[in-house]
Image: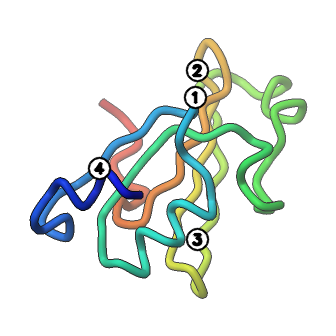
Amino acid sequence: MSKLSVTETPENHVFYFDNFFTSFDLMKSLTEKNVCATGTVRYNRMNSCPIKTDKVMKKEERGASDYRFDEKTKLFAITWKDNNNVKVLSNYEALEPQTT
């Protein structure tokens, strides 16, 4: 979080993280500071978000997805199956589009 002070107006930027940095607590803190961010996330850093686990997603077809939106924290979580399971947390992205 201290590195955000390098940017004069972090609320005018969008930050992207990989799963090494992303956590539910970080995203919640950034939301409180009006900073937009999105990042891939490890399942164990999602604070018990009721989203399908890796074990369940492994049994799904490629392209399957599950998502949740937390009204209280305004965080959006999505998981989908590609070659591996991918999980993303965001405080500004939406569900659509799901195809490329």
N-terminal of the two: label 2 or label 4? 4
* Marks 2 and 4, how far apart at CA: 24 Å
Q: Closer to us: mark 1 or mark 3?
A: 3
Q: Secondary structure at mark 3?
A: strand
N-terminal of the pair, mark 4 or mark 3, is: 4
Looking at the rendered structure, the kind of residue marked 2 is Asp
The residue shown at (67%, 26%) is 85
**Label 3 – label 2 distance at C-alpha:** 21 Å
Q: Position of residue 21 (x, y in %)?
A: 53, 40
Q: Secondary structure at mark 4?
A: strand
Say left or right for 38 vs 60: left
Horizontal and vertical percent for residue 73? 56, 80
Label 2 SS: loop
What residue would you read off at disc 2? 82
Q: Mark 2 and mark 1: span between their CA atoms?
A: 6 Å
Q: How is the image coloured?
A: rainbow
Is 47 rendered above or below residue 89? below
| CA–CA distance in space, label 1 to label 4 | 26 Å
Few, some or many residues within 10 Å of mark 1 (<14, 14–19, 20+): few
Mark 3, residue position: 69
Q: Which residue is mark 1?
A: 63
Asked if the residue under mark 1 is in contact with the one under mark 2, i.e. CB atoms within 8 Å, the reply is yes
